[in-house]
Image (cartoon, grey):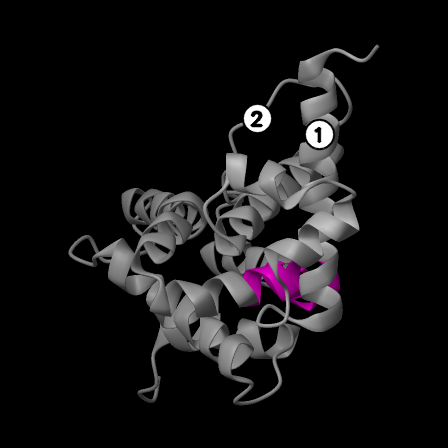
Amino acid sequence: MPEPKRRSEKSRKAIYDAALALVAEIGYPRTTIEGIAARAGVGKQTIYRWWNSKADVLLEAFLDLGEQAEQAARGEGAEPRQYAIPDTGDLAADLKAVLRATVDELRDPKFEAPSRALAAEGLVDAELGRVFVAKLLEPSLQLYVDRLRAAQKAGQVRPEIDPRIALELFVSPLAQRWLQHTAPFSYAYTDTLVDYALYGLAPR
């Protein structure tokens, strides 16, 4: 007979997979706890025992998806590593590289549907919004802060610049285009954002 812990983890994984699949297939508004339970092959009370809402299920499933991607990138059995934006000495090239990787992730259907749903739901569910920002957004933004601070120490960025504000010059426009579909986004677009942010708009 399977151990309760192993059985619980199997159910939890099935629920994660079901939540992510349903959001991608039918959208967040039509996804329900009942639908997730049916897709996962569990009773809805199993879900309510672990989570308070479908938003909570999706957030945890999305965090697990990120952990799986990280584990796959570092290799089976390898120790977790501390992520950082590469520092090649060329700030513009480093920022362009990480933003291009962001474009790839935002275009990946596996990540796009749940992240878009969580971002939208976080605007109306204050608690979910706080958790979404704390667990998903802020750790990523801190990587930019760290890279910009390193550039300040190297004399590549003025010392009085606030890195937390500066990063919004290239991160926020990309997020707006992606969330609101205001215009297409591409490598060329994010490269241009970096150039405008670092070199300004005035004639040189």
Residue sitting at x 34%, y 85%: 201
Residue 112: in magenta span: yes
Q: Earlier in the sequence, mark 2 or mark 1?
A: 1
Side (left or right) of 66 relative to 141:
right
Tell me if label 2 and label 1 are in contact, CB under 8 Å: yes
Residue underneath mark 2: 81
Give the side of residue 127 with respect to residue 186, left or right: left
Q: Secondary structure at mark 1?
A: helix
Image x and y of residue 49, in percent: 52, 35
**The furthest residue to the right:** 1
Q: Is residue 84 magenta?
A: no
> Of 108 and 142, which appears nearest the observer?
108
Task: Categorize mark 2 by other alpha carbons within 10 Å: few (<14), some (14-19), many (20+).
Answer: few
Q: Position of residue 82 (x, y in %)?
A: 51, 29
**Residue at the (65%, 55%) spot, across then down:** 34
Q: Nearer the viewer, residue 137 or 197?
A: 137
Q: In the rendered structure, which segment of residues is drawn in magenta? A: 102-116
Residue type (three-letter) at the residue carrying disc 1: Arg
Task: Place residue 69 in its image quadrant.
Answer: top right
Q: Mark 1 — residue?
A: 74
Residue at position x 67%, y 63% from top? 23
Give the dominant element type of the magenta stretch: helix, strand or loop: helix
Report the label total: 2
- The quadrant of the picture occupied by the C terminus is bottom left
Is 45 located above or below residue 117 in the figure?
A: above
Amino acid tagged 2 = Arg
Q: Residue at x 64, y 65 (%)?
A: 113
- Per the rendering, the mark at residue 104 is none
Position of 57 relative to 107 (above/below): above
The single residue placed furthest to the left in the displayed view is 160
Which secondary structure lies at badge 2?
A: loop
Tell me the distance, in whole angstroms, between the alpha carbons under discs 2 and 1: 8 Å
